[in-house]
Amino acid sequence: MRLAERLNSFPAIAVAALLLAGLFGFVLGITSIGGPAPVVRQAEIEHASSADSARGGPLQSLPGDVRERERPTRPRNGGTTRTPGDAQDGRNGAGGTGSGETRAGTLPPIKATEGVRVLPEGRVDELVTAPAPQAGQGVIEVSVTDINNTSLPFALLALDVNSGPLGWHLVPKQPQAVPETRGLFRFSQLYPGEYRVRSLQSNYKPVEAAVTLLREGATETVSIVLEPLEYAQIEFYVRFEDGEAPVEVELRFDRPGQVDTASGGRFGKYPDTGVAGVGRGIIPPARYRQRTAANGMVMLTLPAGQETTIDFAARRGEIEHQARATVVPTPGVSRQDVTLLPTDPAAGSVTDPATASAGKLAVTLTVDGKAVQFTRVSLYKDINGFQNRPASTQEDNRFVFQNIFTGSWYLVAESPGFHAPFAQQVEVGVETVETIDIKTGRLRVNAARESGSPDPEGSEVHYRVRLRPMGSGTIERAYNGNLTGKQSDYIDFIVPAGPYDVRVESPENSAKLSVSPIEQSFSMGAGGEHSLDFRVSAAATLKFQVVNSNGQPIPNAEYLVTFHAAGSVPESEKTAVEKAGYDGRCEKAIAPSGPVYLMIWTTSTDWNNPDKVLQLDLPAYGTKDLGAIVVQQ
């Protein structure tokens, strides 16, 4: 009886309750704490599962009590003030409590968009269409001869079209040889316009000729006379710094006609190989290996009077050596000395031994004052590069890099304890010892859908968040979230202090999403809190063709899909302007569904005054084809 009384006493009951609570909490802890966050391997992107989003984000998978940190916060870089605490509950779609209230110590979720998007009032032009233009019927025939008036059965030709304010742009067409006529080549299916034919034939001087197709179906003939290049010989004596000659060198040539350039738009640049001057365009650089003669001599035959750049490379032991020479050969035979200098494999460029020597870096890393596990610690010469130098040795949290060049490096460290790579610039001397405590902060990335944005039929709505320290495009981590059936969602991250670019997009093989803004930049402070908001909507495909009142395509028009009225579009959207093709065709595969403004520039160069402004309603996950839009009268 006394035993039963003791078991029923208050102290015994209290002890039993504590034991049960501890056991229950231990079991919950085992089931709720996931494994370590995945680690990026250089350019490889590791994706958290969409289940992370449903639980409130990767914070759920971090070991320890990182989610329960309490610290005062203040707004940073225009961010919203957040109160720290347990913010992992995302079961109601927005990461909140489901009651519409924000609990003390909880980062509040983003609010869903209220109502259908309404565009601000502004200029709207009438949509005037024309019958779809037929394929071009114009023809340019190019007769190619040499200076002896001998027809040449070969030719490497490029064709450009005059795009008004944009200048010359390449027409992606290849000429066809006319079988019955030697030395005659034909560009076909062209629209009326002003064109330029360029010869890129090797062993001949570059030459060009202008031709105009005045009407539909016109045929014009232009003659190009190729003049052989005069060649000269240069003896390059290639040696290492100590005078020893390599047995073999690798050569790379950059001649005129081999350098691609960027063409100018009204408000930005576009990659294009056809805008440069005479003779520049599409020939790839030549590259090959060659054994050296006595004393490291390599004899090269190069065009006389024409600037040519040659890169030399040779390996000595485990170290790559390089050199570069730019020459303008003169007739006859000349000589030039080339000294190969050691290169840093992580930098990919020549390092001058006069300013750099062998160095060593020993760095001890901690996170918020604690020793943690690191999955990778490397040195990069370029924050946007892929090549890196891993630590030579590691002992606990101490990493040693030996036989590296002195100078500036980027130290990149990855750990399951945070979700973005830590990156910091360090100066390496002959013997450098560093102790770095990686301070962290908390980032919440909110994704809210436009009101009425539907789920795709038979599919889910996934979005991807890319975390890029220092704005790098190669050193990054990425995580997926799931918006299916929800108006909003968030993912929480622990990130090292420092500057970031954060990009939101739709993953591959998922329903296409339009995100605004696509990317945001901010700087995380030590122990800080930051929240970024992104608006997500179902994407639409927009197609149209820009023509004049005669139904003829306008080459290389520019266009923008925006929510802003003409005259009030922010300058930052200039980077979103896109260029039509040479035949006026435009296709934007990730346009935001719902009401938008479409702005088109053909003759105007005024950002605030496009040639045409249209208001459209684009279908979610669908395609809207406007046909041929008349822009010029």
Image: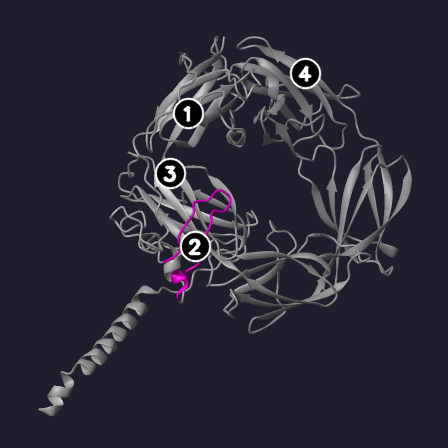
Q: Secondary structure at mark 1?
A: strand
Residues rendered magenta in the picture: 65-85
| Mark closest to the chain's N terminus, 1 or 3 | 3
- Residue 271, percent across and down? 59, 33
Q: Is residue 27 above or below residue 597?
A: below
What amino acid is found at the position of numbered circle 4 in the picture? Ala
Packing grade of label 4 (10 A; few <14, some 14-19, many >=20) is some
| Mark closest to the chain's N terminus, 1 or 2 | 2
Name the front one of labels 1 and 2.
2
Marking on residue 536 = 3
Which residue lies under the disc numbered 1? 543
In the image, taking residue 496 as reference, residue 102 lies left or right, namely: left
In what quadrant of the picture does the N terminus appear?
bottom left
Give the main secondary structure, helix, strand or loop, of the magenta stretch.
loop
Which residue lies under the disc numbered 4? 210
Name the front one of labels 1 and 4.
1
